[in-house]
Image (cartoon, grey):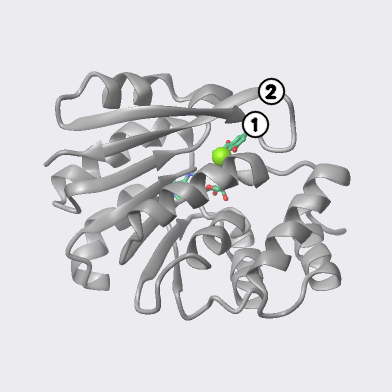
Amino acid sequence: IMTGSSRPQRMLKAVQKNATKGDPKSVISAIDSYCRHKEWAMNVGDDKGLILDSVLTEVNPSTALELGTYCGYSSVRIARLLSPDSKLITIEFNPAFAIIARQIIAYAGLQDKVTLVEGASGDLIPKMKEQFGIKSFDFVFLDHWKDRYVPDTKLLEDCGLLKKGTVLLADNVICPGAPEYLQYVRNNPRYESRYYPSNLEYTKVEDGLEKSVFLG
Ligand SMILES: Nc1ncnc2c1ncn2[C@@H]1O[C@H](Cn2cc(CNC(=O)c3cc([N+](=O)[O-])cc(O)c3O)nn2)[C@@H](O)[C@H]1O
Ligand SMILES: [Mg+2]
């Protein structure tokens, strides 16, 4: 049996202790402060989070997809910026993480804007149209296993879930790195790609986000 708390459980405790219920901004800063000062965790973080915010504000998506929920930090960052009738679908296959993410998303008061689906992205993407009535996504945030970025991007294309102008934003393209993904989107006439330099969450290590616009 597993005893003691997990890192995600401690992160949730920090939110419950330091954030204000229904206030997404306070949830974000509670997690950032905990992960910067107490215990590192693989959230996109505050530095790259500002880039995520600015791309989201520019795109203003009606339907957004996130691959790799983890504890819900970026789900909260994304959902807080969505306009009233817009939705975020976030896919997470680790049930222990999903339980925590649901609580953190609910603590921020964003449960009505976020649908967390448990399972592997490769299995769930083909079900998006029929199960969730999605025609196409306006925005996709990739933050799951780095070797799934290319296959899942191809799957989104093949399932007709990308339309002209859909923006893909990929985390960790430098650290831990997603070299095949950079190769794929940068040498592909169907994408217009741009790199946003930053640093790995809560560290001075170089990392960044790759923004790729699907040209149809
Ligand atoms: N195919 C998949 N489908 C659904 N969920 C998935 C899938 N692969 C991983 N996940 C989930 O993403 C969550 C978070 N996650 C992300 C990664 C990959 N990301 C990293 O490994 C990472 C690693 C560092 N790092 O090591 O410095 C920094 C980061 O920002 C990262 O995103 N592994 N688990 C986990 O809960 C996992 O179950
Ligand atoms: Mg990441």
Amino acid beneath label 2: Val
Left or right, 18 with reference to 100: right
Q: Position of residue 50 (x, y in %)?
A: 57, 46
Check disc 2 and report its element: helix, strand or loop. Answer: loop
Left or right, 156 with reference to 147: left
State ligand 1's quadrant. top right
Q: Position of residue 19 (x, y in %)?
A: 78, 70
Q: What residue sits right under mark 2 in the picture?
A: 205
State whether residue 66 appears in this view.
Answer: no
Asked if the residues shown at circle 2 and circle 1 are in contact, with their CB atoms under 8 angstroms apart, the answer is: yes
User: Residue 59, which numbered label?
Assistant: none
Q: Residues within 10 Å of mark 2 (few under 14, many from 20)?
A: few
Check disc 1 and report its element: helix, strand or loop. Answer: loop
Q: Residue at x 37, y 57 (%)?
A: 65
Q: What residue sits right under mark 1 in the picture?
A: 200
Q: Image quadrant of residue 153?
A: top left
Q: Earlier in the sequence, mark 2 or mark 1?
A: 1
Left or right, 149 with reference to 105: left
State yes or no: Cβ of the residue under disc 2 lies below 8 Å from any atom of ligand 1.
Answer: yes
Left or right, 139 with reference to 100: left
Q: Residues within 10 Å of mark 1 (few under 14, many from 20)?
A: many
Image quadrant occupied by the N terminus: bottom right
State yes or no: Cβ of the residue under disc 1 lies below 8 Å from any atom of ligand 1.
Answer: yes
